[in-house]
Amino acid sequence: MWIILGVIAIAATIANLCMYAAGKDYKIAMAMGLSFTALTLTDAYSMVSTWVKAEDWGALFDVVPTMEIALWILTFISILLNISPILLELKNKK
């Protein structure tokens, strides 16, 4: 499920940037991009919680260290890309 949510977050972020480039109202796409990023993170956390409940320590040891780094980096990129139109508008107003 987290893959589907992640793909939707990426699509919404791309829509956000395309709408900004076209001069259209991009704020709904920005909200969707950030919301689906949050849902992706929540679903990944739920997956890890399921592994803990099942005491699947092998899965935790194998996946979580790499997944943590990837989630931090991808979340940071998602936030920057989604708020970049707002930052560009502020810069252009000055």
Image: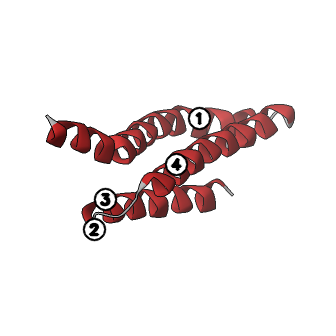
Q: Position of residue 62 (x, y in %)?
A: 59, 38
Q: Secondary structure at mark 1?
A: helix
User: Element under label 4?
Assistant: helix
Question: Which mark is first along the chain, 3 or 4?
Answer: 3
Give the mark nearest the N terminus, 2 or 1: 2
Q: Mark 1 near mark 3, Cβ–Cβ under 8 Å?
A: no
Q: Residue at x 24, y 44 (%)?
A: 89
Q: Earlier in the sequence, mark 1 or mark 4?
A: 4
Corner quadrant of residue 18: bottom left
Q: Label 3 near label 2: C-beta < 8 Å?
A: yes
Front residue (pair 43, 64)? 43
Q: Identify residue type, mark 4.
A: Ala
Element at label 2: loop
Residue receiving disc 2: 22
Q: Nearer the viewer, mark 1 or mark 3?
A: 3
Can you tell which mark lies on residue 20? 3
Q: Position of residue 14 (x, y in %)?
A: 38, 62
Q: Earlier in the sequence, mark 1 or mark 3?
A: 3
Q: Is residue 85 above or below residue 3?
A: above
For badge 3, the amino acid type reads Tyr
Q: Is residue 12 above or below residue 91?
A: below
